Amino acid sequence: MDPLGAPSQFVDIQSLSSWNSSQHEDERDSIITNGKFLQNQKSSSPFPYREDINRKIILWNGNVALLNCTAIVNTSNETLTDKNPVADSIFKYAGPELREELLKLKGCRTGEAKITKGYNLAARFIIHTVGPKYKPKYRTAAESSLFNCYRNVLQLAKEEAMSSVGFCVINSIKRGYPLEDATHIAFRTVRRFLETHGETFDFVVFAVSDLEEGVYRNLLPLYFPRSTQEEIGCLSRLPADIGNALGEPVVPERQIRITEKPGILNDDVEDEFEEKDVSYIGSHAFAQMEGDIDKQRRITLQGNMSEQALQKQHQRNYQRWLCKARSEDLSDVAALRALYQTGMDSHGRTVMVVVGRNIPATLIDLEKALLYFIHVMDHITMKEYVMVYFHTLTNENNHLDSDFLKKLHDIVDIRYKRNLKAFYFVHPTFRSKVSTWFFTTFTVSGLKEKVHQVESLRQLYACISPNQIDIPPFVLDYDSRENGPLYSQYYGSGQL
């Protein structure tokens, strides 16, 4: 084995200094010098001083492949064969088995993230993501894609219960992304994620080279200030666009205006909004959500509201739900692990999993459940996707009633329905088959032909490869008892 790959070369992240303790004396002196000015200022920073978050952040000048943590990040291209210093180093230390596993992933789209084993690395896993190619003409698309890279890496790490992640600089030089612009997106995305899911991670490491260290060290205080004084001092240095509640770039033409009376359409207000790129949220923005959709449709049929106006109102209503979903604490619903993203189906479409037995329908706050669904699914539905619902071993306490499902169907954006290509109902019972038929025939339209009743995992694997879907162990056990054991390689930790 190459001497550089010896275990002694690997770096335990617990031995590295956290960002919270990395403030230099000259920086402290600078703050003290301005103390008379700062002590009279009140901070309104969108990134306030958080010692608990700073303790998790590590800035390290070194090779990400040498980090001893739960997962490290590899930046690559859509075929996962990119030649760049980060990828080359990871392949070198991981060994040839990594390339073999990557072939099974069948590539990765820009902005997405996929996971493999770490093999000979100290890290147990490698999360591969594809950064965007940067062209000034398509800057907005590049910003959104880079945000998705960081967000999807963190989301995947959270879903897999990883305690530490080592980030490389995803925006590789080959792809031409301006380093400073990309660093702003990286920091604010990680910061926002830790604000919501901070309990998930012990450490997040930014592994940089000499080329990037200066920019990273200069911008880190803007998003992770190490004191209230530093928070105030950095406030003027924050860029105009700091993203939304997730750190996602805000596209002005997509912003909405929410009035004090969101249920009332006003043509003058509509015209004013279309002429100005402004975003206004009234103090009662979430005081009431849109009412009965069927009633609105009846009004449309009566000629009192145009179809175009109805669509605008529906979009405004969905945006209200989305904004509320991004601001609510939904950690209790997330902890149920009833909805999560996994791999791709045989057509390269994202697979979302719903575990029926994990839904305490009689105890859960159904509005929060709806908000969580919107929060998780909003970016997934931008592209084609499929859903797998495990009805395995559910009981009456796990069944969401048809009124809730209809409300969910009516609220979600049109792309949810358009881009949903298949809904696999796994291990159905006779009662569930009847209920599903009734619901898709009489309650909602356009869904019936997408629903597929799947009696066994063997049938499901014909559409989704077993290594592309994370199946709960109790589902595997049930299927083995009812339909006979599958091949041994399907088993293990329950993560397929």
Image (cartoon, rainbow, N blue to C red):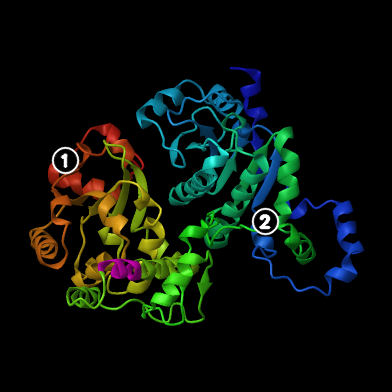
Near-viewer residue (203 or 481): 203
Quadrant placement of the N terminus = top right
Q: Position of residue 136 (x, y in %)?
A: 57, 40
Q: Position of residue 361 (x, y in %)?
A: 28, 70
Q: Residues within 10 Å of mark 2 (few under 14, many from 20)?
A: few
Query: Which residue corresponds to the image point at 36% horizontal and 80% vertical from the top-left?
Result: 263
**Magenta stretch: residue 311 in it?**
yes
The amino acid type, in three-letter code, at marker 1 is Gln
Query: Which residue corresponds to the image point at 61% horizontal and 57% vertical from the top-left?
Result: 241
Q: Is residue 369 visible?
A: no
Q: Is residue 326 left or right of residue 449?
A: right
Cα–Cα span, label 1 and label 2: 51 Å
Query: Which residue corresponds to the image point at 85% horizontal and 54% vertical from the top-left?
Result: 27
**Magenta stretch: residue 196 in it?**
no
Secondary structure found at label 1: helix
Q: Which mark is residue 459?
A: 1
Q: Is residue 264 left or right of residue 10?
A: left
Query: Which residue corresponds to the image point at 32% horizontal and 50% vertical from the top-left?
Result: 352
The amino acid type, in three-letter code, at marker 2 is Pro
Secondary structure found at label 2: loop
Q: Quadrant of residue 317?
A: bottom left
Location of residue 279 with respect to 151 vertically, above or below:
below
Q: Is residue 445 visible?
A: yes
Callout in the foreground (1, 2): 2
Write the start and end of the magenta stretch as one range: 307-314
N-term mark: 1 or 2: 2
* Residue that label 2 marks: 239
Near-viewer residue (181 or 215): 181
Q: Is residue 232 left or right of residue 204?
A: right
Q: Main structural element of the magenta stretch: helix, strand or loop? A: helix
Location of residue 123 with respect to 56 vertically, above or below:
above
